[in-house]
């Protein structure tokens, strides 16, 4: 098998590192190997311990390699999240002299939209076009081949703190792989979980992980907003540990086995649960209703933060399709029902869409990001081949675009 046809996705999460090895086929991807290993070196989505993170990545890669029967891997597409991510919208405009708009014009106008002043410790991770305008015609997805005198674009720009991005890349390199691209985690999860129809209609993707909750808001097929909230499943577990005075491991077990945010639905609220306290103390019993009280308080806080994000950006009216919750943290019982009741919009659990080589075990919300990274990786490697073909042409327009950077806008 040629190494060129092998693609690797790496999701370095707060609770687990997950590796997928796949082969690009003519029209799809075939998963060959899966590795998942507990992660101990991250806090709220950012690397805080390089050594531990490298070890988790290495173990996860080894497991995937063994299953795939592949020895040598070159590079991987990696996901990024963390509190340091800051995303915003920008726009650019260039003259096109009444000729047919070509790829070089599109590159130029995107370059113009990137001409914003980014603080020196930050770098751009994505510049994603939302819509193009040619003269007075708006809502254009692909302006190539159209005629006009003025080309405009609205873009969504995602930035992150350079040292934190570098830490992540360094960990991957120390584990033996090059990072060929870095993708914002909720963009990856959106790819594996949302349908094109949902993205057109208007939908909020919410990936509740262990350390962070990642948001991506879509409308008319465009990414309108993305944000990382430093609050995830671990906070629910910590709340239980504190409220029940039990160790973290026991709190995690209680959350997984009995955890619910609506005690009076399904399980009897008065059902008593045996809990093991701190070492040396006797096992006790607590009612399910108390566990639900603790977990629902945290859920409500998370729902309020999400609502604030939407209201601050005035996006209440665009989300016709409602909300899709994914990530392992979305699995707390009745969370979707509780969210639907709170937000008064349709809410569903987002499960990754199946493709080649995907087992049923992988159709789980905690694998949404890594599966999306793999799909993005395939798309990116195709785009790159296309990019290579027109490299000379784009180099020339890159230079032209850069002169437009003199028109700086202060945004931070
Ligand atoms: N069945 C379940 N019920 C309740 N919570 C669950 C369940 N399964 C997993 N979780 C929770 O999901 C969280 C982990 O989710 P996930 O694997 O998506 O996170 P991650 O990708 O490692 O973290 P992050 O994306 O925040 O960096 C943990 O807090 C875990 O307790
Ligand atoms: Mg995650």
Image (spheres, rainbow, N blue to C red):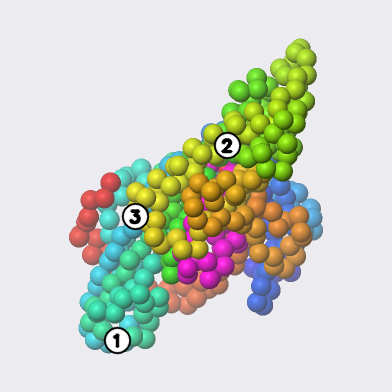
Few, some or many residues within 10 Å of mark 2 (<14, 14–19, 20+) = many
Pair 3/2: label in front = 2
Q: Residue 412 in the image: state x and y as whole percent.
A: 28, 46
Taking 310 as reference, is 340 left or right?
right
Could you tell whether 220 is left or right of 16 in the image? left
Residue pictured at 32% horizontal, 82% vertical: 101
Q: Quadrant of the N terminus?
A: bottom right
Residue denoted by label 1: 147
Residue numbers of the magenta segment? 185-212
Image coordinates of residue 365 in percent, x first then y, are 65, 52
Which is more toward the observer, 128 or 406? 128
Q: In the figure, residue 29 lies in which quadrant? A: bottom right
Report the side of 327 relative to 159 (left or right).
right
Give the residue pinned by disc 3. 314
Q: Which mark is residue 296?
A: 2
Residue at screen point 40% across, 75% down: 141
Is label 3's Cβ within 8 Å of ligand 1?
A: no
Element on which disc 1 rests: loop
For the point 60% across and 31% down, the residue is 293
């Amino acid at each position: 098998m040629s190494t060129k046809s092998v693609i690797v996705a790496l999701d370095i999460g707060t609770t687990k590192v997950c590796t997928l090895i796949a082969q690009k086929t003519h029209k799809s991807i075939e998963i060959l190997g899966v590795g998942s290993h507990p992660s101990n070196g991250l806090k709220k989505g950012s690397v805080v311990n390089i050594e531990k993170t490298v070890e988790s990545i290495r173990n996860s890669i080894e497991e995937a390699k063994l299953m795939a029967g592949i020895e040598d891997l070159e590079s991987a597409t990696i996901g990024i999240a963390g509190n340091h991510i800051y995303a915003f919208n920008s726009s650019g405009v260039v003259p096109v002299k009444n000729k047919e708009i070509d790829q070089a014009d599109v590159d130029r106008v995107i370059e113009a939209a990137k001409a914003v002043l980014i603080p020196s410790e930050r770098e751009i991770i994505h510049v994603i076009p939302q819509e193009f305008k040619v003269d007075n015609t708006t809502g254009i997805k692909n302006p190539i081949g159209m005629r006009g005198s003025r080309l405009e674009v609205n873009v969504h720009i995602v930035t992150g703190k350079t040292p934190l991005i570098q830490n992540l890349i360094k960990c991957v390199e120390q584990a033996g792989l090059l990072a060929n691209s870095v993708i914002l985690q909720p963009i990856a999860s959106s790819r594996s979980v949302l349908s094109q129809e949902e993205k057109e209609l208007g939908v909020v993707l919410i990936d509740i992980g262990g350390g962070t909750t990642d948001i991506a808001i879509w409308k008319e097929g465009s990414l309108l907003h993305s944000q990382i909230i430093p609050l995830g499943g671990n906070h629910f577990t910590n709340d239980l540990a504190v409220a029940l005075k039990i160790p973290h491991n026991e709190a995690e077990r209680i959350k997984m086995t009995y955890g619910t945010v609506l005690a009076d639905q399904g399980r009897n609220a008065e059902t008593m649960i045996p809990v093991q306290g701190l070492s040396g103390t006797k096992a006790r019993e607590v009612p399910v209703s108390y566990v639900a009280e603790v977990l629902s308080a945290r859920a409500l806080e998370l729902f309020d933060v999400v609502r604030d994000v939407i209201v601050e950006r005035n996006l209440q009216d665009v989300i016709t399709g409602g909300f899709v919750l994914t990530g392992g943290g979305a699995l707390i019982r009745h969370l979707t029902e509780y969210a639907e009741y709170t937000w008064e919009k349709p809410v569903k659990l987002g499960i990754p869409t199946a493709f080649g080589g995907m087992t049923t075990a992988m159709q789980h919300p905690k694998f949404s990001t890594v599966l999306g990274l793999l799909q993005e990786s395939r798309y990116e490697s195709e785009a790159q081949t296309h990019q290579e073909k027109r490299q000379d042409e784009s180099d020339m327009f890159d230079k032209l675009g850069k002169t437009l950077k003199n028109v700086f806008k202060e945004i931070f």
